[in-house]
Image: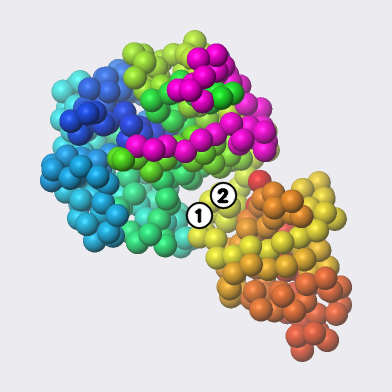
Amino acid sequence: MNTSRTDIKTLVVKIGTSLLSGEGGFDGRVLEQVVMELADLKRESGLNILIVSSGAIGCGMDRLGIKERPRALRLKQATAAVGQARLMHYYQTLFETYGQGLQTAQVLLSAEDLDDRRRYLNIRNTIQTVFDLGSIVPVVNENDSVAIDELKFGDNDTLAARVAAKIGADVLIVLSDVDGLFDRDPAQHRDARLVEVVERITADIEALAGDTGAQTSVGGMKTKLTAARIACATGVRTVIANGRTPGIIRGVLAGTARCTTFAPSSEGMSHRKRWIAFGRAVRGTVHVDAGACRALRERGGSLLPAGVTGVTGRFETGAAVRIVGPDDTEIGHGLVNYSSADIDRIKGCKSREIDAVLGARDYDEVIHRDNLAVL
């Protein structure tokens, strides 16, 4: 990555389930190695370090003697509740042992916490206050014991990216059991080559990703690319690296590690637009034509009804929606001025025709540019 540590103030490290699981269940050897390294970095440089940790359900499965990942929601939540306490005990013990005074703070989040603007801002303030205390490492996880499937982040890769974007991190390191993104599956192809740098996540790059089959994991390379897209869009450099490699975090920061680095966007995104893009839960999709795509991407315009070709899902005024082009490529997220039913009625119309169709014209735009985050 070739980035001086003095240029980095805030580092987010995501530790995947695959690194915390062994043949007999929970395996804390990699966790111990990573905590030792992070504790040293924290003491040496005073970095703001935040950990996004998987493993609560895996820890619970181990504790309860469950061999397969629970599918029933109630059992999944109960398993997470048992495992979360055990997981945090490991972190607290390890940081006390190797951190010479470093402490941990548990932060449990649900997607609903980011959906509400006030709670979204409060999360940022809370984490910043923890950083300001100087000797505390916050450990973030999804609140699996109460979150329902319809309102979940889905995976901790996405959670890590959204938190990194939320707090304005400089670097996000996603630790997994592979060195990074390969041009083909290295488990099946011995000549697979590591993709060391990704300047932009294109359809060709996405085609290289595959999903996981691990019983204790929900992520895979696809979720890591989604995380990289989110983080990079807000200016956070993102790295996928192998957490089993000794000294991997120092190697990533020094630019000597074997890993995949995703270049961040050069254009900054305001915190409000970060919330629109990655905080609000998406309630539906607005489909637009090629002309609207160009207006949004190249000219920073608002989305007018003339450029809308269709609507998917049901939502009310003020909801967050995805905006996709003719080829289903996601352009961005925005807050709508009209409900899905009204947008469906005025799609393809000129703004001046809205009054005749709906009986009133509260806005000329379906989504105003101030409420639109282009990715």
Task: Mark 1 and mark 2 in contact? Answer it, CB < 8 Å.
Answer: yes
Residue 82 is situated, as x and y percent measured from the top left of the image, at 16, 48
Residue drawn 40% across the image and 56% down it = 152
The amino acid pointed to by label 2 is Arg
Q: Main secondary structure of the magenta part?
A: loop
Q: Is residue 318 magenta?
A: no
Quadrant of the rendered structure where residue 215 is? top left
Magenta residue span: 185-214
Query: Can I make out residue 160 in this image?
Result: no
Q: CA separation, marks 1 and 2?
A: 7 Å
Secondary structure state at the residue bearing disc 2: helix
Where is mark 1, residue-wise?
279
Viewer-side residue, 265 vs 126: 265
Secondary structure state at the residue bearing disc 1: helix
Residue 149 is situated, as x and y percent measured from the top left of the image, at 38, 59
Q: Which mark is residue 274?
A: 2
Q: Quadrant of the N terminus?
A: top right
Q: Which mark is residue 325?
A: none
Q: How is the image coloured?
A: rainbow
